[in-house]
Amino acid sequence: MREGTERPRHVRAGVDRRGALARISSWLAAGAAWPLLSAPSRSPSRQREGSSTPSRRVRKIATEEAFVIPEVAAAMREVVQRGGPSLDLNLWRLVYNTVTVEPTVARVATTGPQDRDALARQFLPRLLDLEQLRLAEMDANDVDVHLLSLVSPGVQMFDRDTAVALARLSNDRLSETIRRHPTRFAGLACFAPQDPAAAATEMERAIRSLTLNGFLVNSHTDGVYLDDQRCWPILEAAEALDAPLYIHPRSPSNGMAAPFRDYRMDGSIWGYGMETGTHAVRLMLSGTLDRFPRLRIVLGHMGEALPFWLWRLDYMASPGSRAALKNSLKPSEYMQRNFSMTTSGLEDPLVLRYMIDKVGVERLMWAIDYPFQQTPASVAFINSATLSDAEREQIAHRNAERIFRIAS
Ligand code: MN
């Protein structure tokens, strides 16, 4: 174990006392055992030899790690209770509308099928907690840093004024947390796309005053994508501040929702990737990246399938090949110039190898997608993927240090 001073102490979680949140708070304060913490694993694979194991300990910066603050959780609870057509509600209803949160509801199996709905009912305590369960699990699994971001859909399902206020509050809390643990946490600011001018102001504050490491937006907002001219102040701010903009998934917007309504295809099974990949293609083909050539975009989930499609995108969308296309570069050229990608939630070494060959190791970063993915498996993935030492170090921490300006 490293950094004994950073090990979690009996710190009372700073959450307010309302409804279910109060229950969670007292449960956290009581230091209740968390099932996922019961089997800390120090990856045994590190003992083996060969290119599928690191020859020395590798620093690990996890780059898509979610948290929530009680005020945002309370507002999301109102959103799910109000209901509506948004596909996002399928997951967030389970997370926020669960009156009783018992940490032992689900057993987390390391093999075989898991009851994912039962797991979802356990996400909230782990999202609210920053300094107890989280740091303990990072320590137990040899994870150095979480690059934190407000959990999807951020403030993007709130009315404009609520969204603006909660974005500011969330960024303040994030910054305070990082200040308490500067070697363990970095953070991506949220903003309210509902009010692009206020978003730009908050983005500037987040970088210049709070010294956060970039931004995260959860794909569309009320069906509006970032290529929409109304969103240009947001892209202008990100470019001017030279800070990366992580486009994180949420469920398909109402306009593309119908075929995703069955079989829980709304979320991480398939809908998230389709929604977010579509968003990225819109940025390419709309010419938005010609207007903002220095915009730095990050995609999760191995690039939301875009690297797999890249040859066909180039073939079908070469500049000027169709009247509707507004891109001046090939999609692969935008990919090389404007995008980097993380491994979040897709722990397949063959896909990782393809990504290295197709888009380049210098734009790939490791991520867990905590608490939705399991830390031990994600750590085992990056420790055991067949990589050279240099590749593993680039993906595990060096690229994140460069792209997000995290101290090495
Ligand atoms: Mn995520």
Image (spheres, rainbow, N blue to C red):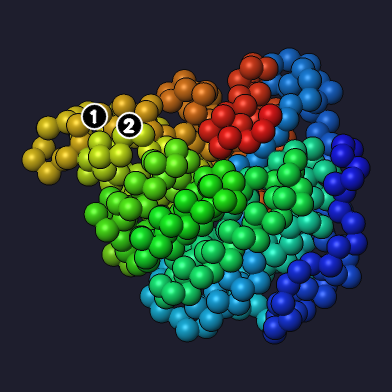
Question: What secondary structure is found at the residue carrying circle 2?
Answer: helix
Of the residues shown, which amino acid type is indicated by label 1? Leu
Residue positioned 51% across, 70% down in the render:
165
**Residue behind mark 2:** 334
Instruction: Classify residue 67 as left or right of residue 282.
Output: right
Q: Amino acid at mark 2?
A: Tyr
Kindly identify which numbered label has been placed on residue 141.
none
Contact, mark 2 vs mark 1 (Cβ under 8 Å): yes
Badge 2: residue crowd in 10 Å (few <14, some 14–19, many ≥20)? some
Identify the image quadrant of residue 383: top right
Earlier along the polypeptide chain: callout 2 or callout 1? 1
Beta carbon at label 1 within 8 Å of ligand 1: no
Is residue 188 among the parts visible in the rendering? no
Comparing 39 with 330, the one in front is 330
- In the picture as drawn, the residue positioned furthest to the left comes out as 323
Q: CA distance from mark 2 to mark 1?
A: 7 Å
User: Which residue lies under the disc numbered 1?
Assistant: 329
